[in-house]
């Protein structure tokens, strides 16, 4: 529809989550108008992020280097893992200042509609951590929506027979919402009020 490079960029933006064809077009033409240095700065940020930041090899949080800031912090309590869906949820829990353990990021949630099963998530990697890290409690801190609950249920069934204490954050969070939108106080209380998951 447009000259090659413009259409290429529109196609690239169109592949990003939450960006439809209209927005993709608007962003591309916006970048066409801005000074070159502004566009270059954006391009550089993307390149730099891809070069310097990756996922922690232990917990799959974002990391500069092989392991993330939480995993390399000796003051964090070993043996307690807070399981979340995405790195942004780590940020949400950290904001509460209520949690001193470590994390495990699944990089998604179970969603049959989108064809995402446990094998697409970092579940095997979670199981592999239990023994070497002497994990005594796993806190299921997935989102309070259908996918998050399904994921928590699945993990609870998987983990309980392995002799590890499995807890779920308390209700009180807005149902159907995302953890990242919960305020620190509410999320902090939900963590504090976590309950052991029964069979
Ligand atoms: Zn980590």
Image: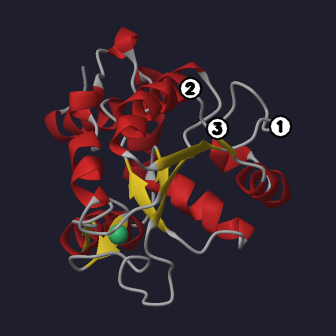
Q: Is residue 44 left or right of residue 76?
A: left
**Label 1: how many Cα within 10 Å (few below 14, some 14–19, many 20+):** few
- Up the image or down, 128 lies above or below 153; here it is below
Q: Which residue is mark 1?
A: 172
Q: Is residue 190 above or below residue 8?
A: below
Is the residue 127 above or below the residue 82 in the image? above
Q: Mark 2: few, some, or many residues within 10 Å (few <14, many ≥20)?
A: some
- Marks 3 and 2, Cα distance to the nearest angstrom? 12 Å
Give the mark nearer the N terminus: 3 vs 2: 2
| Disc ID at residue 2 | none
Is disc 2 placed on a helix, strand or loop? helix
Q: Classify residue 52 as left or right of residue 138.
A: left
State how far apart marks 3 and 1 are (Cα).
12 Å
Say what secondary structure mark 1 lies in: loop
Q: Which residue is label 3 attached to?
A: 178
In the foreground, 155 or 145: 155
Q: Position of residue 93 (x, y in %)?
A: 63, 61
Q: Is residue 80 above or below residue 198?
A: below
Task: Mark 3 and ligand 1: say if the CB distance to the nearest ligand atom is below 8 Å.
Answer: no
Ligand 1, image quadrant it occupies: bottom left
Residue farthest toward the bottom in the current orientation of the protein: 74
Q: Give percent across and percent down for residue 31.
A: 40, 51
> Which image quadrant is residue 192 in?
bottom right
Who comes first in sequence, dot 1 or dot 2?
2
Q: Nearer the viewer, mark 3 or mark 2?
A: 2
Q: Nearer the viewer, residue 169 or 53?
A: 169
Q: Residue at x 64, y 69 (%)?
A: 99
Q: Is residue 13 left or right of residue 149?
A: left
Which residue is found at the position 83% from the left and 51% from the top?
Answer: 186
Question: Are discs 3 and 2 less than 8 Å apart at CB?
Answer: no
- Give the x, y percent position of residue 74: 43, 90
Foreground pick, 128 / 144: 128
């Amino acid at each position: 529809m447009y000259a090659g490079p413009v259409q290429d960029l529109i196609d690239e933006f169109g592949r990003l989550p939450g960006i439809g064809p209209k927005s993709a077009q608007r962003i591309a033409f916006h970048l066409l108008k801005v000074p070159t240095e502004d566009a270059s700065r954006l391009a550089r940020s993307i390149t730099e992020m891809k070069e310097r930041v990756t996922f922690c090899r232990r917990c799959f949080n974002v990391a500069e280097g092989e392991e993330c800031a939480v995993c390399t912090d000796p003051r964090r309590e070993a043996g307690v893992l807070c399981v979340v869906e995405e790195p942004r949820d780590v940020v949400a829990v950290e904001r509460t200042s209520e949690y001193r353990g470590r994390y495990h990021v699944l990089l998604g949630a179970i969603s049959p509609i989108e064809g995402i099963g446990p094998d697409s998530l970092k579940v095997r990697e979670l199981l592999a951590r239990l023994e070497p890290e002497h994990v005594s409690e796993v806190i299921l801190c997935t989102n309070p929506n259908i996918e998050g609950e399904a994921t928590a249920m699945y993990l609870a069934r998987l983990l309980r027979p392995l002799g590890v204490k499995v807890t779920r954050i308390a209700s009180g969070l807005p149902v159907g919402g995302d953890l990242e939108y919960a305020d620190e106080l509410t999320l902090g209380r939900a963590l504090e009020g976590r309950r052991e998951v029964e069979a």
